[in-house]
Structure formats: C-alpha cells, structure tokens
Image: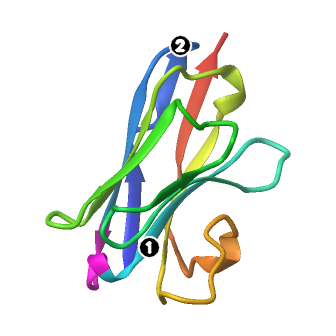
Amino acid sequence: VQLQASGGGLVQAGASLRLSCAASGSTFSSYRMGWFRQAPGKEREFVAFIDWGGDNTNYADSVKGRFTISRDNAVNMVYLQMNGLKPEDTAVYFCAAGGGRYGYTYYLATSYGYWGQGTLVTVSS
C-alpha cells in the first residue's frame, strides 16, 4: 500500500488542522492505520491509531481529547482532526499502515510496515 499525507501548515496556537492520508495500491480496509509525528531533534512518537473498521481508536496521552482519528474505507482515506493545537505539537506527521490482526503493538512504529512521506505542522505561540 502507498500512502500520501497532506494537510499540514503553519497555524497559531489554539487553531485546528485536519490531516489527510490517501492510500492506494491494495485493500485499504485490511490495514490498521496510525499517525506518528517527529519533532526536530526528537524521536518519532505515536499519536493515534485506528483499527480496520474504525471501531477501535487509541491516542497518545498528549493529544487525547484534542485529536481525533477517523477513516473512510470507501475512499481509502484516514484523517487526523487536530483541535486546540499547541506549539509542542509542531512536528512532521506521518501516516502508517500495518497488516496483520495479531501480535502487534499499536503505539510502536515497528508494528507498521508502510509509511507516507510526512506533512509538516508548525504551531506558533
């Protein structure tokens, strides 16, 4: 599966953005999806997870209550709605896809075999 993330930009603190990730090349609904981010000088970190049908989601504590992950299997898209953005949310955001229904840990990057190119989100104070 190929992934293309978009929707990043420069916003002020408190603003909202919606990131999109378009998937192509395989059966999208068979993949669990995640969003990760990497700030300058820091390691890539987990942001949000959604399962195949969209019934199960999980979030990093730092974004819980502000970010919402969703997917539309009919159009092969996954989204990350980001509200109440903070300067510490500044990072390159990556969408990722993982196959297999067992033996994975949703917040580990190693559980995802496919990655998009990333989209930059910059939040000014």
The quarter in which the N terminus is drawn is bottom left
Query: Residue at 35% across / 73% down in the picture?
Result: 52
- Range of residues picked out in magenta: 23-29
**Of the residues under marks 2 and 1, which one precedes in the sequence?**
2
Residue 56 location (% of width, % of height): 43, 62
Residue bearing the label numbered 2: 14
How far across and down, in percent of the image, does residue 100 sit? 48, 89
| Residue 50 belongs to magenta span | no
Q: Nearer the viewer, residue 65 or 33?
A: 65
Residue 79 pos. (x, y %): 36, 49
- Residue at horizontal 42%, vertical 69%? 51
Q: Give the residue type at disc 1.
A: Arg
Q: Is residue 105 left or right of residue 95?
A: right
Where disc 1 sits, the SS reads strand
Q: Nearer the viewer, mark 2 or mark 1?
A: 1
Q: Nearer the viewer, residue 79 or 68?
A: 68
User: Measured from the top left, where is residue 91 in percent x and y?
Assistant: 65, 39
Q: Residue furthest front?
A: 55
**Label 1: which residue?**
32
